[in-house]
Image: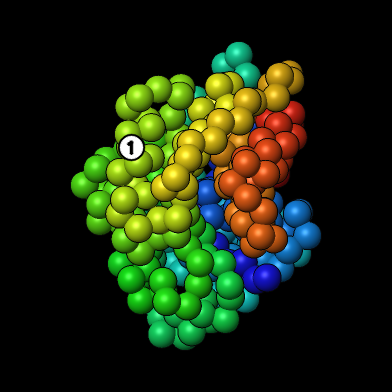
Amino acid sequence: MKFISIGDNCMDVYKQMGKAFPGGNSVNFSVYVKQLGECSSYLGVVGNDDYGDIMIEQIRSKKVDISHVQKVEGETAHTNVEIKNGDRILNDYDEGVLKHFNLSDEDLQYIRSHDFLHTAIWGNCERYLNYLKDYVTISFDFADRIDLVKIKEVCPNVDYAFLSYSEDNLSIRNTLEQIVSLGPKCAVATLGANGSVAYDGVSFYKEKAKRIDVVDTLGAGDSFIAAFMVGIAKGYDVRMCLQMGTRKASKTITYFGAW
């Protein structure tokens, strides 16, 4: 199976450490899928600055196909990050050249050569999903933006939807049910230390988080989604996919940076 992620990339800048790490939901997804042994591509845009060069070099070093990454004049997206008690605190964010990201006809044809497509709320790609849904299986990460207007707009063009939340309660279960009623085969909420919960139109499934020492939570949700979707590609059931996501995320939080 061939996976492609499109949209956001971002340099995560840890000023207190004097370091910067490449990331962004779509980039992270592509790297994690490759780590899981699958064919993986990333399509996005970077600026012609130092961060853009670092981003391209680092993604390439992970053996992800970046043949269709665009490089344009301007600044690469970046976020200032702090670590407090193992949790990441996201401060100032500069969207940079990602703000004007567009896909060409050639890009759309390239995407169609894959089996699975992933993108996220920050990727500026929602307008292309209606066209692509007939050619690829689509996963979409809404993160913590539980906006029913946006959900109703995007979900008819999505097969697997993901949210970030805090606990398994009636509110999030109602939201998962609403999402599936709009078309997706399954909706999943990652709950941090409280594990994850999924709904497939018939049943709810709950998976506990692994109890380990946390270094940095950056990338945990993205790695969960990547492993879950690899499980789907392999034909596993929802419960097994939740377990795969949990195992992958538990490794991601044991080091600084997404990957």
> Is 95 on the left or on the right of 253, as rendered?
left
Residue 184 drawn above or below residue 248: below
- Is residue 256 at all visible to an observer of this figure? no
User: Which corner quadrant of the image does residue 209 belong to?
Assistant: top right
Residue 80 drawn above or below residue 170: below
Q: Nearer the viewer, residue 103 or 204?
A: 204
Identify the residue at image location x=67%, y=66%: 40
Q: Nearer the viewer, residue 86 or 225?
A: 225
Q: Secondary structure at mark 1?
A: helix
Colour scheme employed for the rendering of this structure: rainbow
Identify the residue at image location x=69%, y=60%: 234
> Is 143 on the left or on the right of 19, as rendered?
left
Q: Where does residue 7 sit, x and y in percent of width and height?
A: 46, 60
Q: Where does residue 130 sit, x and y in percent of width and height?
A: 33, 71
Residue 171 drawn above or below residue 252: above
Identify the residue at image location x=58%, y=75%: 114
Q: Nearer the viewer, residue 162 or 90?
A: 162
Identify the residue at image location x=45%, y=24%: 168
Q: Where does residue 28 sit, x and y in percent of width and height?
A: 61, 50
> Disc 1 residue type?
Thr
- Is residue 40 at all visible to an observer of this figure? yes
Q: Residue extending furthest top? A: 85
Label 1 neighbour load within 10 Å: few <14, some 14-19, many 20+: some
Q: Residue extending furthest front? A: 202
User: Which corner quadrant of the image does residue 17 belong to?
Assistant: top right
Q: Where does residue 3 sit, x and y in percent of width and height?
A: 62, 66
Q: Which residue is mark 1?
A: 175
